[in-house]
Amino acid sequence: MAEAERIIGTPDIPDATGADPEQSDGGDDAAAQRAEAAAKPRGRRRIAVLFGVAALAYALDLVSKMIVVAKLEHHEPIEIIGDWLKFEAIRNAGAAFGFGEAFTIIFTVIAAIVILVIARLARKLYSLPWAIALGLLLGGALGNLTDRIFRSPGVFEGAVVDFIAPKGFAVFNLADSAIVCGGILIVLLSFRGLDPDGTVHKD
């Protein structure tokens, strides 16, 4: 009997579910392909959110600076909430909130690197909160980088236009606000264990 089985060969035996093992492998591959196909539109939507938020933040910053330069620069500050909040046009050669004025070119390079890193992360982005956070960072970085490139005293050394002046605090702009809000959101997402690809981990 054993000799006969050796000659004829043992037929494939279905598993406990009654499925052929070879068909099961094919099913797993098909399931993986369907999951990947379903993830692609979701990833594209998250990328659209990222660039939509970035475009909105950039446009608001750009328009606000144009208005400030045209209407407020070389004029008296405008009181919004008494002495607690004013609009006062200044030119800032440093980083956000006026820090590091001697390192304008370095901050310009850092802003460009941040933009490139965000562009690379976008390819693996499946999380809506991360898309919003990175969009805020991207829009803010682009807003201030535009000033660095196109405003005086020169290319890559331009001074950023700041105008929001709370009492007892540094003067800043909408791009700075977008960067800070995006950074805070990223910290919160990291504490919750949510990664840009949408997975959740717990240390």
Image (cartoon, rainbow, N blue to C red):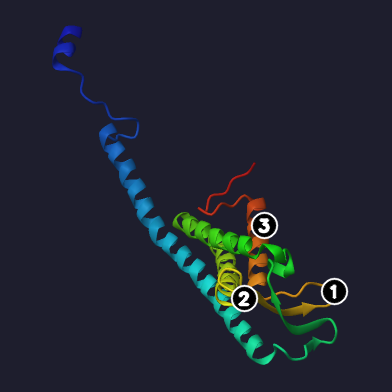
Report the side of 81 relative to 117 (left or right). Answer: right
Q: Residue under circle 2?
A: 153
What amino acid type should be assigned to the residue bearing mark 3? Leu
* Residue 175: quarter of image: bottom right
Q: Residue under circle 1?
A: 168
Question: Mark 3, mark 1: which one is toward the viewer?
Answer: 1
Percent x, y for residue 118?
Answer: 52, 59
SS class of the residue under badge 1? loop
Question: Mark 2, mark 3: which one is toward the viewer?
Answer: 2
Other-residue count near label 2 (Cα within 10 Å), few / some / many at <14 / 14–19 / ≥20: few
Circles 2 and 3 in contact, beta carbons < 8 Å: no
What amino acid type should be assigned to the residue bearing mark 2? Pro
Percent x, y for residue 22?
Answer: 26, 34
User: Number of labelled discs?
Assistant: 3
What amino acid type should be assigned to the residue bearing mark 1? Gly
SS class of the residue under badge 3? helix
Q: Tell me which residue sits at (56%, 51%) in the image.
A: 195
Q: Quadrant of the C terminus?
A: top right
Q: CA distance from mark 2 to mark 1?
A: 28 Å
Question: Mark 2, mark 1: which one is toward the viewer?
Answer: 2
Q: Which residue is more in the foreground, 65 or 123? A: 65
Q: Quadrant of the N terminus?
A: top left
Q: Tell me which residue sits at (30%, 34%) in the image.
A: 18
Q: Residue under circle 3?
A: 188
Q: Which residue is more in the foreground, 31 or 152? A: 152
Q: CA distance from mark 2 to mark 3?
A: 38 Å
In the figure, 127 relative to 56: above or below?
above
